[in-house]
Amino acid sequence: MIVEQIYTGCLAQGAYYIQSEGEVAIIDPLREVQPYIAKAARNGAKIKYIFETHFHADFVSGHLDLSRQTGAQIVYGPNANPSFDCIVAEDNQVFQVGKVSIKVLHTPGHTMESSCYLLIDENGHEHCLFSGDTLFIGDVGRPDLAQKLGSITTKDLAGFLYDSLRNKIMTLSDDLIIYPAHGAGSACGKNMSKETFDTLGNQKATNYALKEQTKEDFIAAVTDGLLPPPYYFPKNVMMNKTGIKTMDEIVKSVQALSPEAFEVAANETGAIVIDTRTAQVFKDAFIPNSINIGIKGDFAPWIGTLITDIEQEILFVAEEENIDEVITRLSRVGYDNVIGYLAGGINAWVAAGKETDSIESISATEFAKRFEEAEGNLVVKDVRKQTEYTAEHVDEAMNIPLAVLSDNMAEFSKTETNYIHCAGGYRSMMASSILKARGFDNVVDVAGGFAEIAKTSVPKTDFVCPSKLK
């Protein structure tokens, strides 16, 4: 028996490869399916089943393409209603993969079709649980994504989740390995651990949602502090229910554009220009009005958060070696309307005599110097999440999380310099580029973010352990 977690850090997503006696099951595959096919081929095995724990909202699944290419059957749990042929399993239905069995446990709560898959080895031992978005390490799935106006509320779903956890999962053996669909960084929960698997026994001891509590207390705990989901979530659900372009079709539709063609495309289509280079490279020279979302970070989730229209036409700038990666990561969250990229990158743009813009970025040491010279009277904007800000921040700094930046433009000064920082410099350059594109020329990025500022003499609030925050 082979059980392998295939973890994609930029999405905080776990897919799974299970093999026994030359037969393979894949659980929650990503959109680019070739790695799964290649792995099975190397092992001399055939993919038999594709199990989906639910209709994913945070990424576009590869179930249909994988099924087309391998002939494997797609399996969903009860209540699923896709527009394509698949097996809609019954609760407790068992599927055979070689000498191992995979048992369906219907666990509504995150969504109504949410199901976990219990792997039983060749000796009849319950080995592990693929828990999808029902149970995470340190958290449980948010219960607000599948609410339906007039019929099912967030509290209803939270109640279903309480019952699912206690009646279906917590009755299982403490030594059972829990393999969730996501880890820290995913928007599908609010308190996920950086660990990507654990035992059920340890989760019973440490996970706030599994402690002894009434259903009412559980509902209050899991619904408290939920941030609004990214705009692309409902669209991804629909794509996963109805069908999508193949990766081959997407790659073939993206054109390499000369600087002249790139400029014409931007002007004629209204496409947004995404510059995927690192923050400290981007700052020196970029296409005016372009937005920096670095590929070396949580690229796809931030694309989905900042670009509210999933049909938005996109042009991008990237280093040559990252072009395919950018296309892949955009497609993972359903942004398929990519017109093209700048052939030759920013160097070609400069060589063609095209205009560039820049953003001033200073060290934390320089920031501290300016802060002292101004006697603390600087306009400082902290674009971290509210919980990060509450834990510790620069005295008098205003918190405007990057996720809601566009709704709070009036909070930025049009006359004084706005000093922008995040935790490490990734989000602050995104924020600075958005402000630049909106006409704010008086922005200064603080490189290294609060991690570096904390080492200076800049006055800060007392530290509060994040574990004590909601």
Image (cartoon, grey):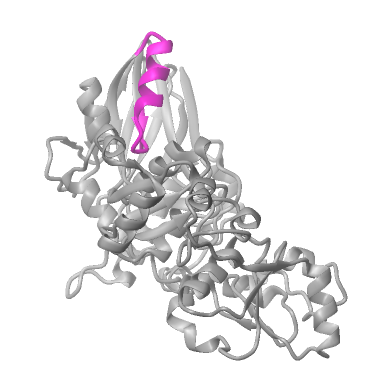
Residue at 20% in and 21% down:
71
Q: Position of residue 292 (x, y in %)?
A: 52, 59
Q: Residue furthest right?
A: 457
* Depicted 365 relative to depicted 91: above or below: below
Q: Please provide percent x and percent y for residue 318.
A: 49, 46
80 or 285: nearer the viewer: 285
Q: Is residue 177 visible?
A: no
- Residue at the (24%, 21%) spot, across then down: 70
134 is higher (above) or lower (below) than 444: above
Q: Nearer the viewer, residue 232 or 265?
A: 265
Residue extending furthest toward the top? 44
Which stretch is magenta? 26-45
Left or right for 360, reference 3: right
Q: Residue at x 41, y 53 (%)?
A: 165
User: Residue 95 appears at what percent x and percent y?
Assistant: 27, 26
Q: Quadrant of the C terminus?
A: bottom right
Residue 28 is inside the magenta segment: yes
Question: Which residue corresponds to the image point at 27% horizontal and 35% vertical from the top-left?
Answer: 252
Residue 427 as seen in the image, left or right of residue 189: right
- Of 411 and 13, nearer the camera is 411
Q: How many marks?
A: 0
Return the residue nearer the eye: 141 or 326. Answer: 326
Is 38 above or below relative to 59? above
On screen, residue 260 above or below 467: above
Figure quadrant of residue 35: top left
